[in-house]
Image (cartoon, helix red, strand yellow):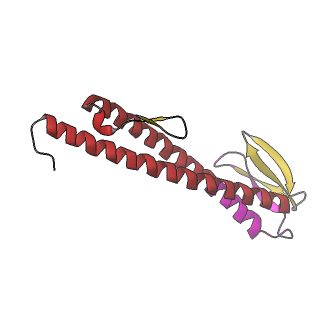
Amino acid sequence: MSSTAKGQETVSLDSLSANQLSAVKKQLDDEVEHLSGSYTQLAAAQAQFKECLRILKSQSVEEKRDILVPLTNSLYVKGQLADPDKVLVDVGTGFYVEKERKNATEYYESKTKDLGANIQGLEAIIQGKTNNLRLVEEVLRQKVLASSGAPAQ
């Protein structure tokens, strides 16, 4: 065993039993599944921010003031914008902040950029975990073949 820079210990896969390798494989499977779910959620959030940004940029301040206000997912009522240069921005957990269009655009651009960086970092982590999983699966396969007396390929 050797220590790494982060204080974690490195163990040779060859020194583990088949049961231990199975436990490591299950743990890696769970981690990859969890990280993939997080990736999907981040990508969905980024898509929502991009859509908000697209809408902000596509509508001019002088456009019609008549709008449809959503009451539910399928029920809308007619309304009018009091000030088309101000918008409500969802800042999370059900809180909304009134912002000027320019500030709202900057907010959504910043969020989109930040999420993009987080997504890239998460992609690298998922790739590393997936590579580790493949290594564990290969060593486990070789151990199972060796213990059953079949020649390893």
Outermost residue, front direction? 2
In the image, is residue 137 above or below residue 51? above
Residue 43 seen from this side:
no
Q: Position of residue 9 (x, y in %)?
A: 46, 34
Q: Which residues are magenta?
A: 46-75
22, 97: nearer the viewer:
22
Outermost residue, right direction? 83
Left or right for 108, reference 27: right
Question: Based on the displayed image, in which of its 4 quarters is residue 99 positioned?
Answer: bottom right
Left or right for 66, reference 53: right
Q: Position of residue 61 (x, y in %)?
A: 85, 68
83, 35: nearer the viewer:
35
In the image, is residue 75 above or below residue 31? below
Question: Based on the displayed image, in which of its 4 quarters is residue 52 positioned?
Answer: bottom right
Q: Residue at x 62, y 57 (%)?
A: 116
Q: Position of residue 47 (x, y in %)?
A: 61, 57
In the image, is residue 26 above or below residue 61? above
98, 15: nearer the viewer:
15
Left or right for 117, reference 141: right
Question: Based on the displayed image, in which of its 4 quarters is residue 54 positioned?
Answer: bottom right
Q: Residue at x 11, y 35 (%)?
A: 148
Q: Position of residue 87 (x, y in %)?
A: 83, 55
